[in-house]
Image: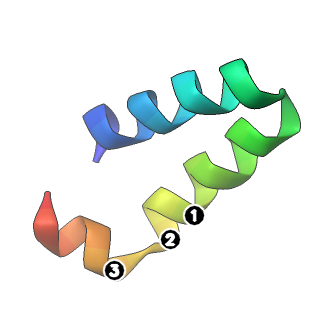
Amino acid sequence: CIVVACSFVERGRKRGGGWAQRDLVFVFSSKDLREQV
C-alpha cells in the first residue's frame, strides 16, 4: 500500500497539492487496492 500511495502522492503533486492528499486517503481506504497490493 505504501508504494502505491507514494506513486499517487507524486502524481498529485504534479497535478496539484490537495488532490494528492485525497488520493492518498482513497488508496488506503480502498479495499480493492489493498487486495491487489
Circle 1 is placed at which residue position?
26
- Of residues 15 and 30, which is closer to you in this image? 15
Q: CA distance from mark 2 to mark 3?
A: 6 Å
Which residue is rendered at x = 83% and y = 28% of the image? 16
Q: Label 3: how many residues lie within 10 Å, few (<14), some (14-19) or many (20+)?
A: few
Q: Position of residue 15 (x, y in %)?
A: 75, 29
Residue type of the residue flagged with mark 2: Ser
Q: Is residue 30 left or right of residue 17?
A: left
Q: Of label 1 and label 3, which has the lower sequence position?
A: 1
- Name the secondary structure under disc 3: helix
- Name the secondary structure under disc 1: helix
Q: Is residue 37 left or right of residue 31?
A: left
Relative to 30, residue 22 above or below: above
Q: CA distance from mark 1 to mark 3?
A: 10 Å
Tag of residue 37: none
Question: Looking at the figure, which quarter contains the C terminus?
Answer: bottom left
Q: Are marks 2 and 1 in contact (CB under 8 Å)?
A: yes
Which residue is rendered at x = 42% and y = 40% of the image? 5
Residue type of the residue flagged with mark 1: Phe
Circle 2 is placed at which residue position?
29
Which residue is rendered at x = 66% and y = 32% of the image? 12
Circle 3 is placed at which residue position?
31
Q: CA distance from mark 2 to mark 1?
A: 5 Å
Q: Position of residue 29 (x, y in %)?
A: 50, 71
Which residue is rendered at x = 15% and y = 74% of the image? 35
- Name the secondary structure under disc 2: helix
